């Protein structure tokens, strides 16, 4: 039973989330929308965003799942410290994340000069986009998987170990299947966050068309009138929302089938 008093604030909250999107739909120039969406100004950043977000998500999986396991299976004090460190990018303003990445990998940064000596320049490249997206998206995967691991507990892992299964076998055949829904949710959240990343990318990777101009940066560029109109920015915003909604719906359906 839901207390009736909750319906009013719930309705206000839903309205706050839906009305801005409705306002965006009302601003769309529907007759010109197909031409705007099929223009190079839309397709190029969309392709770049999908490609870099996919690579970032793979990196999040490769790095985040082990990190989540370490946190979930560590002693409480160690786990609390690691969890706090992982959560920091979530609460940092995006621009601060970009400055942090530049301070580490940019010219004059902690590692930047050493990398340039061997011929590696990361800032203002497509690789910088991937790194920035991974930096902001990784915590979403770690938190989702770590929470699922703590909920699942270690009972089945201990049983498998007593039956002679090695640690690698236990991880692959017991741990990962148990946290499947959490892993799926974390993967989707990471991809969606990487797809919408703006601030850290703008500072660390720049805004070069075809190289670092992802969808959020293309929207910003269009809205500021750099060679295109506001209609282009609205169309790009609608396209980004549509892609995100499609991904969430498809994965949500898949997750429901897994849980059932």
Image (tube, rainbow, N blue to C red):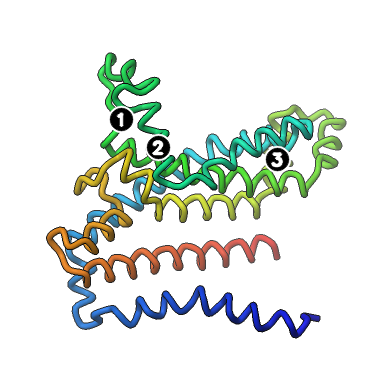
Q: Position of residue 196 (x, y in %)?
A: 40, 55
Q: Are marks 2 and 1 in contact (CB under 8 Å)?
A: yes
Q: Residue 234, image x and y in percent?
A: 28, 70
Secondary structure type for disc 1: loop
* Whole-percent x, y for residue 168 in the image: 69, 29
Taking depth in this image into account, of 76 and 56 the one nearest to the observer is 76
View extreme (left): residue: 227
Q: Earlier in the sequence, mark 1 or mark 3?
A: 1
Find disc 1 in the rendering and name its residue. Answer: 122
Quadrant assignment, res 9: bottom right
| Mark 3 → mark 2, Cα distance in angstroms | 31 Å
Q: Which residue is mark 3?
A: 173
78 over 94 or under it: above or below: above
Residue 110 position (above or below residue 174): above
Q: Quadrant of residue 98?
A: top left
Badge nearest the viewer, 3 or 2: 2
* Position of the N terminus by quadrant: bottom right
Q: Residue at x 45, y 79 (%)?
A: 19
> Helix or strand or loop: what does disc 2 sit on?
helix
Which structural element holds mark 3?
helix
Q: Residues within 10 Å of mark 2 (few under 14, many from 20)?
A: many
Image spot of residue 51 (x, y percent): 34, 48
Q: Residue at x 40, y 26 (%)?
A: 104
Q: Dot 1 surroundings within 10 Å: few (below 14), some, or many (20 or more)? A: many
Q: Nearer the viewer, residue 229 or 248?
A: 229
Q: Are marks 1 and 3 in contact (CB under 8 Å)?
A: no
- What distance separates the C-alpha of mark 1 from that of mark 3? 38 Å
Label at residue 131? 2
Q: What separation in Å lies between label 2 and label 1 (alpha carbons)?
A: 9 Å
């Amino acid at each position: 039973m839901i207390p009736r008093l909750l319906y009013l604030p719930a309705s206000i909250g839903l309205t706050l989330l839906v009305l801005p999107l409705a306002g965006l739909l009302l601003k769309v120039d529907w007759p010109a929308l197909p031409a705007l969406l099929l223009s190079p100004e839309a397709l190029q950043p969309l392709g770049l965003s999908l490609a870099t977000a996919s690579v970032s998500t793979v990196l999040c999986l490769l790095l985040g799942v082990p990190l989540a396991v370490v946190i979930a299976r560590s002693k409480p004090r160690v786990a609390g410290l690691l969890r706090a460190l992982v959560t920091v990018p979530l609460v940092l303003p995006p621009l601060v994340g970009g400055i942090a990445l530049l301070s580490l990998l940019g010219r004059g940064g902690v590692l930047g000069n050493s990398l340039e000596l061997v011929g590696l320049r990361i800032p203002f490249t497509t690789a910088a986009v991937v790194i920035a997206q991974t930096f902001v998206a990784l915590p979403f995967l770690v938190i989702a998987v770590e929470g699922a691991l703590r909920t699942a507990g270690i009972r089945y892992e201990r049983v498998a170990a007593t039956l002679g299964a090695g640690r690698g076998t236990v991880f692959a055949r017991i741990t990962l299947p148990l946290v499947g829904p959490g892993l799926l949710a974390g993967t989707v959240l990471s991809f969606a966050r990487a797809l919408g990343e703006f601030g850290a990318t703008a500072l660390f990777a720049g805004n070069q068309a075809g190289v670092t101009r992802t969808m959020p940066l293309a929207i910003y560029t269009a809205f500021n009138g750099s060679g295109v109109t506001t209609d282009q920015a609205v169309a790009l915003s609608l396209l980004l929302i549509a892609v995100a909604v499609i991904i969430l719906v498809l994965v949500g359906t898949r997750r429901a089938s897994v849980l059932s």
